Amino acid sequence: MKVNVLAAIASLSFAPSLFLPGLVAPAFAENVEHVRQLLSTKECSGCDLTNAGLRLANLTRADLRGADLSGVNLDQADLTGADLSGANLTGAVLFRTNLTGVNLTGANLTGANLNGAYLAHANLSGANLSYANLMGAFLGNANIAGALFLETANLQGVQGLPTGVLQPEDYYRIGYENARVGNHAAAMDQYNQALKLNPTFAAAYLGRGVTRLQLGDTNGAIEDWTRAETLFTNQGNENGAQISQQFMTATQERLRASRRRSGGSFVSLMNSLVPLLLQFLVF
């Protein structure tokens, strides 16, 4: 039920992007000769490596400019310093792949799975990251300025994101994704980042209030919802203002009922409250 509540909250500012995980690559490549060429020379510019099985391969400083790597399995491979500029990596599996210093300018990473990938000093300028999974990836000193469709990528748990790249809505979405899987401490950090960049982002206050409730900070939740109601009202969003007020009213009523019973734990209170809040988040 908590997941549904969070999903509904997200719709106040935008519909959360659906995550399309990287496709599991078949074990064999369509072009065996090109695979042999790559492994023996590391020179395979423009090669057809569609669906190639290259798990754990040593491809340091490989030349893969403009290569077709769609559906390739590069799970835990080492591509340190490789040139993949303009390469097609649609649906590629790059789970925990070492991509240190890799040139990915103009590469197509649509739907690629970069879960846990190491992208320190990588150049992603102009790369298409539409629905890419970057969950838990490391991007220290990476260049992602000009990366396309970053707002649709799964950035949950990403480390080392360059400052000034993400917008408040991006931090909000990352916060939502963290809250959705129960990582409320991380969600709090992301909501804080969103509000640091945009102190009048009403939906972020509403989402952070739910996260605070999940963490047991009822007073903090009510404060956030109060702030959300004021902002929504000032911004002419009557629906958002009403929902914020209903959150506060429902929480306060449940608190009073809990005190009268003088025996219920906060966990039981929260569990009984969440289904009640859900009815207020139908749009």
Image (cartoon, helix red, strand yellow):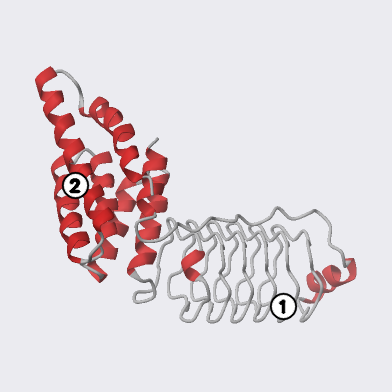
Of marks 2 and 1, which one's residue comes earlier in the chain?
1
Q: Residue at x 24, y 41 (%)?
A: 213
Name the kind of residue labelled 1 in the image: Leu
Classify mark 2: helix, strand or loop.
Answer: helix
Horizontal placement of 36 versus 259: left or right? right
How much space separates mark 2 and mark 1, taking CA atoms? 56 Å
Please tell me in which quadrant of the rendered image residue 192 appears: bottom left
Residues 169 and 30: in front is: 169
Q: In x, y percent, where is residue 62? A: 70, 76
Q: Is residue 262 visible?
A: no
Label ID, residue 8: none
Camera-side residue of 170 and 67? 170
Q: Is residue 45 left or right of residue 274?
A: right
Quadrant including the N terminus: top left
Q: Quadrant of residue 36?
A: bottom right
Instruction: Specify whether residue 119 is in view.
Output: yes
Task: Name which residue type carries label 2.
Answer: Gln
Q: Residue at x 19, y 21 (%)?
A: 264
| 137 lies left or right of 270 | right
Residue 56 in which image quadrant: bottom right
Neighbour class for label 2 at 10 Å: few (<14), some, many (≥20)? some
Disc number at residue 245?
2
The location of residue 10, given as percent across then percent down, is: 38, 54
Residue 64's disc is 1
